[in-house]
Every structure is written in C-alpha cells, then in structure tokens.
C-alpha cells in the first residue's frame, strides 16, 4: 500500500490541477446539465422536475429548434467540404514544384487566426451589406447585387464564405500530410503512365490519413460556430431565423430568456450530435484511412 | 572498314539519342517552368482575394465617413487619423480601459494554461502511474465537448460564488487546465524527448519535479512557445465567455467593446468602428509575423485550429 502510494503520488500531484478542473469544470457540469435538462429552471426559483417535458416539447412542438438544426446542418454540410476542398487544393499546389511557399503559406493562414475575432465579423457585415464592397464589385461587372445579410435566402452563404476564407489551418495540416507520402510512389506511377487524376485518387487520397483528422476536427468546429453568427445576426439569428445557429439559439434560451432547463436539454442534444459524428468517424475510419506506417 | 561503319552508325545513334533526350528535357523544363508560372499567377490571385477584405478594412479606417462606401479604391484621398483618436474615446469608457482589461485576462490566462497544462502533460507523457491510460482517454474526450454543454452549470456555480462581473470565471479555469488542447500539444512534444534523460536524472536522485523543471521544460521551449502564442491569440479573441460573465462596461474586454459600436450603428461611426477593429487585430498580426514558424509547426504537429 505504501509502495503503491509512493509510486503514484508524484504523478497525481502533477495531475492535480487538471483532475480538479476535470471534475469541477467538465464532468460535474455535464452531469448537472443532464439533471437540469429534466427540469424547469429560471435561476430565481429552485429547479422544478418536469421529466421528459423539455425533450418532448423540443422534438414535437419547437419549430425554432428544428429551424436551428436545419441552419446548423446546412452550414456544416456546406462549410466543411468547401473549406476542406479549398485547403487540399491549395496544399497540393504548394506541395509540388514551388520553392518559395513560405509567403503564400503565411498569407493563406492569416485569416484562420483572425477569423474568429469580432473585428472580422464586423467587417463581414459591411462587406456583404446592401452598399457593401461585394455589391460594388459586382456592379462594376454590371451585375445587380442583393442585400446579402438581410435577405434570409442568402445570409447563411455569407457565413459559408467566411468559413472558406479560413481554409488556412486545414491547409497546413494537409501540407504536413502530403510531405509524408513517399515520392517514389508518384515516380513509379509516372513511369507507368498513370494519369494525374488517378494518381490523386489512388495515391494521394488513400494515403492522406490527415483527411480523416481534418474532417472530424472541422465538423466539430463547425457545429460550435458562435461568435460570427452572433455578431452578423445581431445576436438573434435574424433575418427570419436564417442565421439561427444552434449555439445562438441555445445562448438566447439560456441568457436572454433564462430558460436554463430547456437550454440544458438543447446542450445535451448538441453533445449527442457531436458525439455521434465523432464516433461514426472513428469506427468507420479503418475502412477508409490507411496509415503509411502504423505506430502505437 | 566494316567495324568503322558500325562504329559510325553507333556514334550517330548515340548522338541522336542524346539530342532527343536533351530536347525532351528542354521541353519538360519549359513545361515545368510554364506550370510554375501558372501556379504563381493562380496563387497570387488567390492571395489578393484573401487579403482584399483586410486591406479594405485598413484603408477604410483612414477614410472620411463619406468615402468608405462608394469607391473601391483602397487609397484614401487623404489619410485621416480622426477615426483612431475619436474612436478610442467614442464609447462610454475609453479603449485604454478595455485594452488593460484584455491584457489582464489574457496575461493571467496564458500563465494559467502554461503551468497547469504542462503539469498534466508531464504526468501523462513521462510518469508511470495507475490509471494513466484511463485518465488520458478522459482528457482526450474533453477535447470533443462543446463549451455550450458545460456553460449553464458553470454559470450557475460562478454566480453563486459571486464571481460574475469579475475575471475569475475567465481566468481560474485556465489554471485548472480547462483548455485540454494544450495538454495534448505538450504531451506530443514531451514524448519525443529521450527517456534516458529522466532515467539518468532519477539515478542521480532528482525528484520528478526537478526533472520537470530542469530537464523537460528547458528542452520544451518550442512547445511552450507555441502553446503560449495560441492561448494568447485565442483568449484575446474570446467572445462568448466575456459576453456571459462581464456585464459592467468598466470590466469589458476589447471584443465586447467592439460589439458596442454595432449597437450605435445609427450614429454612422463606421470609420471609428473600423479603426478600433484594426487596432484589435494588430496584436494578433504582430504575433503572427514574429512567431510564424512556431505557429505553423504547432498546427502541423498537433492539428489545432
């Protein structure tokens, strides 16, 4: 017993801050929000147990919940592939035949660092406003613009474009992955006269294990989009709920209307959605990810 | 006679082959050069599109109000710094206050992240203990959890503790390694360091803390630097947590202050809003330019955003 203690004590001392954090800031709150999701709670009165009411209401009668799901899934389905295709395309251009890629890499990455800031969200509102830059550029080509942000049919696309603009970080990960593919595979294919496209589908894609990594990371990230949607929609999901991202809806339920119980139920549904996506990606990965050299 | 004819034949053939090979090489070189030029043209085009919004923001911050919307030219007819001087004091509190607040929150958060995450990473990467793989798996799972799920109970708890409208809810979690990304990043790095170092130090009677402090940390400055830069940029840009926990304008951070400009859009202070937006991005851009190599390597090895 004493030896057990002596062996483990130093490690747990180092682990202590994280352990406290894990129980008080992660596990505890997650369980607490599970409990709150079965209650009605306005922060003034004590939580009142209502069973499954929150979930039943959410799935059967809350049209804004479905709207939020619709907006968020549409965004994920558009923004993630757009960003990844852009990232992979540019990474492949940078990977071969160019000696000076440092400057390009820096330019393409910069938006990823700035993109989450409020300043950029403010800028985006103005770029796509009725009298904004985008419409002015289109006007010089004689095209009649639209009021992109205030039109419910187009507002979501401005955020998809913002997501595409930030293709830099998956691009860097792709670049590292491309470096890991042995050159001789391409040379052998070249000698065999394999066309470029088949080299891409038969060598690059299967050996680029980071695609999987990027896909999971970017999908989770896209589900969590908040700041830009919040700023561009004035914090409400306007116009006509077309920017009612799931997180924006959750924020409003919790901190504007103080329906903490209902918001907790929303949070748990989000957690389950993200968990399902991650699990599916992991469990199917062995069928479509090939590692060049398996390591522990 | 006969031999010399074949020799000549051979010589001609070799010469011909060399000429063809040379021509082919020339053609390939030319094609490759053309391909390269085409690539550069394309990449420069993409760069311009990517940077245009940022340059537009910068240019607009120097323009008089009536020039911002209306012309696409980036160059202002005259450079005016009014937007900066007036914007700095346009809100009920001066931006000096907001920058000091942001600096306090960011500085403390970075310190908290570095200390607590390197502690945990050291335990995971270098120490043997019961339950290591179990806790490591738990730590990796927390990477997936959206902040929104823990937000409400955390808020209720911090409200009870009387921490709302202080910086404690923003800073204290960082001292408890709540940004598990950095643990992951540091574990990756610590694992690569040779084990013999720890073993030798252990035989010399060094305590685990001594090994952490005198061996692991000094050898891990690149990883610590990467973590410091990322946590600095992320905390600086953080919006959701300050939005929830800071209600009093005196304690606002810069992103919250910027949002106030949007509430007074009717007053048409676009120039000032843009000027302050530019200023808020300046620290990030400076850090990016200074530490670009570290940032790029950090992403490539850990896959952070």
Image: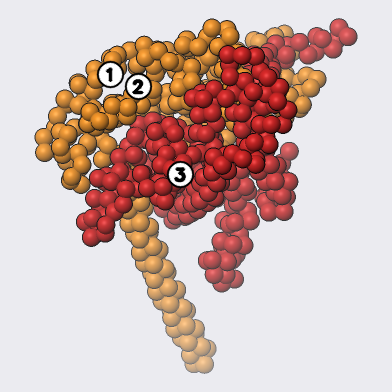
Chain colours: A red, B orange
User: What subunit carries mark 2?
Assistant: B
Question: Where does the image place residue B226, in percent across and percent down from the top left?
Answer: 50, 27
Residue at horizontal 46 percent and vertical 86 percent from the top? B8
Question: Pointer 1 indicates a residue of which chain?
Answer: B
x 34%, y 16%: residue: B98
| Mark sitting on residue B268 | none
Q: Which mark is residue B257?
A: 2
Query: Label 3 to label 2, Cα distance in Å?
Result: 26 Å
Name the element at disc 1: loop
Q: Are marks 3 and 2 on the same chain?
A: no
Which residue corresponds to the image point at 86% horizontal and 7% vertical from the top-left? A2
Q: Which residue is mark 3?
A: A242
The label nearer to you, 3 versus 2, is 3
Q: Would you say the residues marked 1 and 2 are in contact, meaning their CB atoms lie under 8 Å apart? A: yes
Q: Is residue A80 left or right of residue B268?
A: right
Residue A60 to residue B17: above or below: above
In the rendered view, would you say B204 is above or below A85? above
Marks 1 and 3 on same chain? no
Q: What is the C-alpha distance between the residues marked 1 and 2?
A: 8 Å
Task: Work out which quarter of the rendered image holds the N terminus of chain A and state it.
Answer: top right
Proximity of marks 1 and 3: CB atoms separated by less than 8 Å: no
Residue A85 to residue B64: above or below: below
In the rendered image, which quarter contains the C terminus of chain A? top right
C-alpha gap between disc 1 and disc 3:
31 Å
């Amino acid at each position: 017993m004493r030896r057990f203690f002596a062996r483990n004590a130093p490690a747990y001392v180092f682990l202590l801050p994280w352990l406290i954090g894990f129980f008080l800031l992660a596990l505890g709150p997650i369980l607490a929000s599970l409990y709150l999701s079965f209650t009605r709670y306005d922060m003034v009165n004590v939580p009142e147990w209502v069973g499954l009411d929150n979930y039943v209401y959410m799935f059967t009668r809350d049209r804004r919940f479905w709207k939020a799901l619709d907006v968020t899934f549409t965004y994920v389905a558009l923004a993630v592939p757009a960003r990844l295709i852009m990232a992979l395309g540019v990474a492949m251009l940078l990977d071969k035949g160019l000696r000076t890629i440092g400057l390009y890499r820096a330019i393409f990455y910069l938006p990823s660092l700035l993109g989450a800031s409020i300043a950029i969200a403010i800028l985006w509102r103005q770029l796509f406003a009725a009298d904004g830059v985008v419409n002015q550029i289109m006007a010089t080509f004689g095209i009649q613009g639209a009021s992109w942000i205030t039109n419910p049919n187009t507002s979501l696309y401005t955020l998809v474009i913002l997501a595409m603009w930030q293709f830099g970080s998956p691009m860097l990960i792709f670049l590292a992955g491309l470096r890991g593919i042995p050159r001789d595979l391409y040379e052998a294919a070249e000698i065999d006269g394999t066309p470029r496209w088949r080299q891409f589908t038969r060598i690059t894609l299967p050996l680029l294990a980071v695609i999987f990594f990027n896909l999971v990371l970017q999908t989770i990230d896209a589900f969590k989009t908040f700041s830009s949607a919040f700023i561009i929609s004035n914090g409400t999901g306007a116009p006509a709920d077309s920017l009612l991202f799931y997180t924006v809806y959750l924020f409003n339920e919790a901190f504007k209307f103080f329906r903490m119980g209902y918001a907790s139920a929303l949070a748990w549904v989000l957690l389950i959605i993200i968990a399902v996506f991650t699990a599916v990606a992991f469990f199917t990965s062995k069928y479509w990810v090939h590692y060049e050299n398996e390591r522990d | 006679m006969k031999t010399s004819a074949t020799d000549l034949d051979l010589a001609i053939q070799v010469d011909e082959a060399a000429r063809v090979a040379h021509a082919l090489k020339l053609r390939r070189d030319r094609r490759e050069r053309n391909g390269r030029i085409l690539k550069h043209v394309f990449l420069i085009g993409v760069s311009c599109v990517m940077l245009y919004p940022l340059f537009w923001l910068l240019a607009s911050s120097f323009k008089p109000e009536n020039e911002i919307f209306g012309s696409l030219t980036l160059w202002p007819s005259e450079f005016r710094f009014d937007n900066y001087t007036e914007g700095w004091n346009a809100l009920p509190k001066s931006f000096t206050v907001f920058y000091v607040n942001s600096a306090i929150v960011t500085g403390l958060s970075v310190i908290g992240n570095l200390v607590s995450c390197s502690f945990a990473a050291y335990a995971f990467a270098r120490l043997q203990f019961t339950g290591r793989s179990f806790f490591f798996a738990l730590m990796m799972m927390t990477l997936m959890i959206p902040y929104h799920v823990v937000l409400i109970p955390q808020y209720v708890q911090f409200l009870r503790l009387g921490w709302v409208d202080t910086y404690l809810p923003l800073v204290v979690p960082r001292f408890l390694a709540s940004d598990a990304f950095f643990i992951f990043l540091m574990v990756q790095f610590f694992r690569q360091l040779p084990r013999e170092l720890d073993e030798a130090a252990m035989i010399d009677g060094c305590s685990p803390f001594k090994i952490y402090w005198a061996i692991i940390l000094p050898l891990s400055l690149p990883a610590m630097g990467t973590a410091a830069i990322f946590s600095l940029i992320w905390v600086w840009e953080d919006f959701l947590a300050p939005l929830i926990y800071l209600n009093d304008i005196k304690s606002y951070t810069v992103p919250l202050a910027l949002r106030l400009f949007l509430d007074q859009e009717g007053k048409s202070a676009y120039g000032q809003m843009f000027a302050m937006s530019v200023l808020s991005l300046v620290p990030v851009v400076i850090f990016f330019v200074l530490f670009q190599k570290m940032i790029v390597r950090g992403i490539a090895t850990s896959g952070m955003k």
